[in-house]
Amino acid sequence: SQQGEEDPQALSIQEGENATMNCSYKTSINNLQWYRQNSGRGLVHLILIRSNEREKHSGRLRVTLDTSKKSSSLLITASRAADTASYFCATSRGNTGNQFYFGTGTSLTVIP
Amino acid sequence: DAGVIQSPRHEVTEMGQEVTLRCKPISGHDYLFWYRQTMMRGLELLIYFNNNVPIDDSGMPEDRFSAKMPNASFSTLKIQPSEPRDSAVYFCASSQTILPNTIYFGEGSWLTVV
């Protein structure tokens, strides 16, 4: 990819379990965002974490950022079948922080 | 707001034909992005504009690809001539300068070149 990699590429879990996805990137960033893509649809923003933050929560989502390791993780707690989608991290860099590059995505399947 | 609007949603065209994809960004957003998504290469940033000016087109794969933004509410991505390897989903997205600079995506234009 142009910027980073998510892993695993695919993840299958039972409803109610937690899902953890990781993102690694290559260059220094302004912020990192996670997006979700349902099959056949555009990407939808989930959460943003700034480069000077280490952890952020939003509902059932928890994001961590380790700039020294150039990595981030997205945790979805108490997963639901409706969480089935692909998840992408996007890193913002450039002079204005408005140049976004996406990873390769993690395909999450939550089995009811 | 209606969100980012792309057209056409689906297009099937023959190799060698010209393809024009259209995008209307969210009103008030000053950044516009064109991305291409394929299974092999993931989501690639092709080009982006700020205040209608192209800032970085280093992701445009070849001279067959061109993009314009004649005003704040309209952009086009053109492929001429098209080739089968251009088959992909092309997304337009927009954002604003100030944080949170969330990117809002359109639903994509699904292009098949046969």
Image (cartoon, helix red, strand yellow):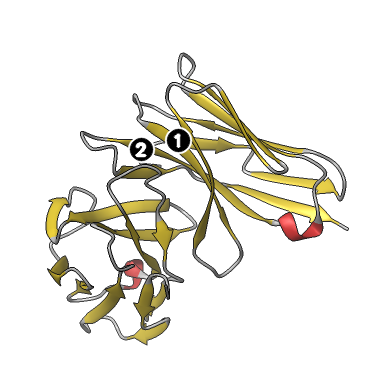
**Chain for mark 2?**
A
Query: Image point 80% across, 48% down: which residue?
Result: A79
Numbered marks: total: 2
Which residue shows up at 55% across the image and 28% down it?
A72
Distance Cα–Cα, label 1 vs label 2 = 6 Å
Quarter assignment of residue A92: top left
- Which quadrant of the rendered structure holds the C terminus of chain A? bottom right
**How far from the left and from the top, in percent, is residue B22?**
27, 77
Provide the secondary structure element on which disc 2 rests.
strand
Which of the pair B59/A77 is nearer the observer?
Answer: A77
* SS for dot 1: strand
Horizontal placement of A76 versus A53: left or right?
right
Q: Considering depth in this image, is A53 or B22 the residue closer to the camera?
A: A53
With respect to residue B23, does B29 lie above or below? above
Q: Amino acid at mark 2?
A: Ser
Q: Is residue B17 above or below residue B65?
A: below
- Locate the N terminus of chain A by quadrant: top left
Q: On the image, numbered disc 2 is attached to which residue?
A: A92
Q: Residue A14: give its label.
A: none
Give the x, y percent position of residue B87.
Answer: 38, 70
Amino acid type shown at disc 1 = Leu
Mark 1 and mark 2 on one chain: yes
Q: Chain of mark 1?
A: A
Q: Are marks 1 and 2 in contact (CB under 8 Å)?
A: yes
Dot 1 or dot 2: first in sequence order is 1
- Judge from the rendering whether residue B10 lies leftward or rightward of residue B92; answer left or right: right
**Mark 1 lies on residue:** A32
Q: Give x and y (percent) for residue B37.
A: 42, 59
Q: In which image quadrant can residue A102 be found?
A: top left
Disc 2 residue crowd, few under 14, some 14–19, many 20+, Cα 10 Å: many
The percent coordinates of residue B66 (x first, y second) are 15, 66
